[in-house]
Image (tube, rainbow, N blue to C red):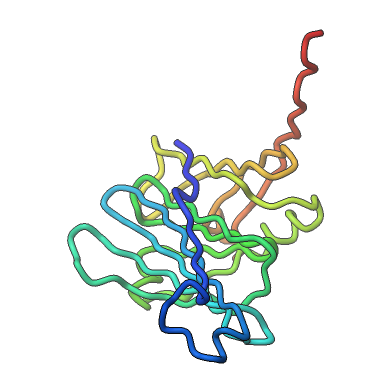
Amino acid sequence: NTSSGAGSSTSSAQDSPNNNKAQEDQEEVWESLVAGGDGTLILSTLNPNGNPNGNSRTLLRWRITSPTPHVRVLPPAVTKTPPRLFLDPTGYHNVVVTDKNTYYLNGKCYENKEPIREMKKWEKVMEKDRCVITSIAWDVASGTESNPKRLLLGTSNSSCYSASLLPQDSTSDEPSITFLGKFQTPPLPH
């Protein structure tokens, strides 16, 4: 099973009939992205609020069993492209990928019981390989809500990695990531 952002939309403050002079002088763009899985919906919104450190990104997580969303705000980041949202088939594990940062959140993060985890080891590997994560395949057969097991990561330069969201042994506090190969497009027949 693979997952990816299911949809996105943008709107401009200039489209709003209630513009004031400040809004007319400076365009604000709101961006929305959605991912869903097993009775869970994740909505990500971006508001470029003039913060010199980057834009404010809010994540809202709804469960079908609860009408009230849990809300988390990611650290400000300057991004050139919209992030990608990935949600595992259980609806519990969520990965957010920007052009520079990768974050992991689980259901407890949304309930403010655990911190948002920045995947620094993944980020270093992606920076070295000059790519970003574009797809994630989840281990549906052996992954669970408490441990998603291994993942396959596809990247913007056709590389494939095996990775984990959680540390795999007691010798490290970092999740693992291992290069599996780079895939070449076969030549087209003449």
3 displayed left or right of 75 = left
* Closer to us: 106 or 64: 64
30 displayed left or right of 142 = right
* Closer to us: 100 or 171: 100
At x 33%, y 57%, the residue is 41
Q: Quadrant of residue 117?
A: bottom right
Up the image or down, 151 lies above or below 87; here it is above
**Residue projecting furthest to the bottom:** 21
At x 46%, y 39%, the residue is 139
Residue 103 visible at all: yes
Task: Measuring from the top left, give residue 134's x and y in whole percent.
Answer: 61, 47
Task: Measuring from the top left, give residue 116's x and y in whole percent.
Answer: 49, 72
38 displayed left or right of 173 = left
Residue 75 visible at all: no
Quarter of the rendering occupied by the C terminus: top right
Task: Measuring from the top left, give residue 1's x and y in whole percent.
Answer: 44, 36
At x 19%, y 67%, the residue is 67
Task: Measuring from the top left, give residue 5's x and y in whole percent.
Answer: 48, 50
* Closer to us: 97 or 8: 8
How many numbered marks are there?
0
Up the image or down, 149 lies above or below 44; here it is above
* Closer to us: 13 or 159: 13
113 displayed left or right of 80 = left
At x 72%, y 39%, the residue is 159
Q: Quadrant of residue 84?
A: bottom right
